[in-house]
Image: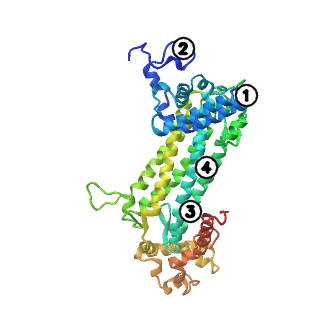
Amino acid sequence: MAGGVTGGAAGTWSDRFEQGLHPFIEAFNASIGFDLTLLQEDLDGSIAHARMLASVGVITEAEAEQLVEGLETVRAEAASGSFQPGLADEDVHFAVERRLIALLGPVGKKLHTGRSRNDQVGTDLRLWLRRRLDGLDQDLQRLQGALLTQADRHRRTMIPGYTHLQRAQPLCLAHHLLAYVEMLERDRERLQDVRKRVNICPLGAAALAGTPVPIDRQRTAKELGFSAVYANSLDAVSDRDFCVEFSAAASLVMAHLSRLAEEVIAWASEEFGFVRLSDRCATGSSLMPQKKNPDVPELVRGKTGRVFGHLQGLLTMIKGLPLAYNKDFQEDKEALFDAFRTTRDCVEAMAILFEEGLDFRVERLNEAVEQDFSNATDVADYLVSRGVPFREAYQLVGAVVRRCLEQGCLLRDLDLIAWKELHPAFEADLHDALAPRAVVAARRSEGGTGFERVDEQLQRWLQRFNGTQPVG
C-alpha cells in the first residue's frame, strides 16, 4: 500500500488527531470482528453504569431512563439483525456508543462519564465468562451423569486394568468409569473456584487511576451481580489472571476428556473390541466399506491441543506487560472465546457419546480378564494370607508365570499337585481365589474395585445426582 493513505474517522478520537488511520492499520487495530461477542454484556454494564450515574446526581433520572431505553433499543436491533457495526466502529464499545448517540443525540454522549474502555472491557469479559462458567458446570454434570448411567449398568461387568498399557489386574468396569466421574468433579471444583475471582468488578477504575466523578462502584457491582470490587484501580484494568486461570482449568478438563477419548478409541478397535460404536456417533470410510471410525473421541483428543495452546498464548501475552492497560490485551478475547467454545463442545460431544454412542461388549470384556496373568498378584496375596512373607511369595509367583509362559498355559491351568510342588501352603481353594470375579471382589479396601466398594461409591454419586445428599 502507498504511504500516506488514510481511512477511518478521525472523529473517533480527540481533536489531537487530524487524520484517520491508514486503512490497513485500521483493520489491524480493530477488534469488532470478534468482541461483538460481548455485546449483551456491554449493554448490561452500560445500563448499570447509567443508573448509577443518576443515583449519584451526575446525570438526571430522566437522562438515565433515556440511556437505558436507548441501550435496550440497541439490544432489540441486535436481536433483529439490524445492528450491524462495521470496521469504522473499531470495537463493540464504540459501536454501542455511536448508535446510542445516533438514537439520543447529546444525551447519548453522557454515558461514558466516569469510565474508560479499559474498565469497561474488563467488566464485559468477566460478565461473559461468569455466565458461561455456570453453563459449563451443567455440561460437566451431564457428562458425569452419562458416565454414572453406564457405571450403574455395569456394576458387575469386568474389564482388564492396565499399568504401562500392560495387563495388570482385573477391574470392575463401573470402578473404571467412576474414576472419570471423580476427575470431572475436580474440574467442576476448579471452575467454581475460578468463578470466585472472575466475580470481582473492575468498573469505576476508569483508564487506570480512578475518576474524580463521584461514582458509586459498589452500586454498579451489586446491580451486575459481582461479589466485590477491585481494591486497586491499576490492578483492576490490567488483571487478566482470570483468563489464564480459566484456560488452565479448561486445559485440565480437556486433558481428562482426552484420556477418556484415547481409551474409547482403543476399546473400539478390533484388537480390543470392548465397545461397539453406534451409527449416531461414528463415521465410515470413503474407500473402505467395512470401516466405522471413532471420530468423536479422535476430535476431542485433537482439539485438546487448541486449549493448551490458548493457555500458553495468554501466559506469554501477560508475562512482560507493565502496568496498566496495554493493547496486547486485545489478544485475550479470541483465545478466551475459543478455549471456552472448544471445551464446552468437547464436553457435550463426550456426553452424547456415552449417552447413545457406544455399547460395552460385556461378554468380550468378561472373556478378556480370563486370558492373562492379571491374577498373579492374587496368588502372592493368597500365600501372604497363609503366613508367607510377601517378597518370598512375589518371587515364587514370578517364577510360576515364567514357567507358564514357557509351557503356553495360564495360572488357572495348573492343577493342585503342581501348585503343591511349588509351595505346601497352596490348598484346593486356590482356583476359586484366582477366578477373575473373585479377584475383583477381594479388593475391598476403601476406594478399591471390589464390587461392594463400587456399590458404595455408586450409591454415593447417585444420591448426589438425585439431590438427596452431597458427595463428601
Give the foreground label among 3 and 1: 1
Q: Residue at x 61, y 66 (%)?
A: 466
- How far apart marks 3 and 4 lie (CA) works out to 19 Å
Kind of residue at disc 4: Leu
Give the foreground label among 1 and 4: 1
Kind of residue at disc 2: Phe
Residue neighbourhood size for the residue with mark 4, other residues' Cα within 10 Å, grouped as few (<14), some (14–19), many (≥20): many
Question: What label sits on residue 17 in the rendered view?
Answer: 2
Q: Secondary structure at mark 2?
A: loop
- How far apart marks 3 and 2 lie (CA) works out to 61 Å
Kind of residue at disc 1: Gly
Q: Secondary structure at mark 1?
A: loop
Question: What label sits on residue 191 in the rendered view?
Answer: 4
Q: Is residue 15 above or below residue 407?
A: above
Which label's residue is closer to the chain start, 3 or 4? 3
Question: What label sits on residue 57 in the rendered view?
Answer: 1
Q: Report if residue 332 is visible in the image.
A: no
Q: Which residue is at the front of the view, 464 or 303?
A: 464
Q: Is residue 381 above or below residue 242?
A: below
Which label's residue is closer to the chain start, 3 or 1? 1
Give the foreground label among 2 and 1: 1
Residue neighbourhood size for the residue with mark 1, other residues' Cα within 10 Å, grouped as few (<14), some (14–19), many (≥20): few
Which label's residue is closer to the chain start, 2 or 1? 2
Question: What label sits on residue 179 in the rendered view?
Answer: 3
- How far apart marks 2 and 1 lie (CA) works out to 32 Å
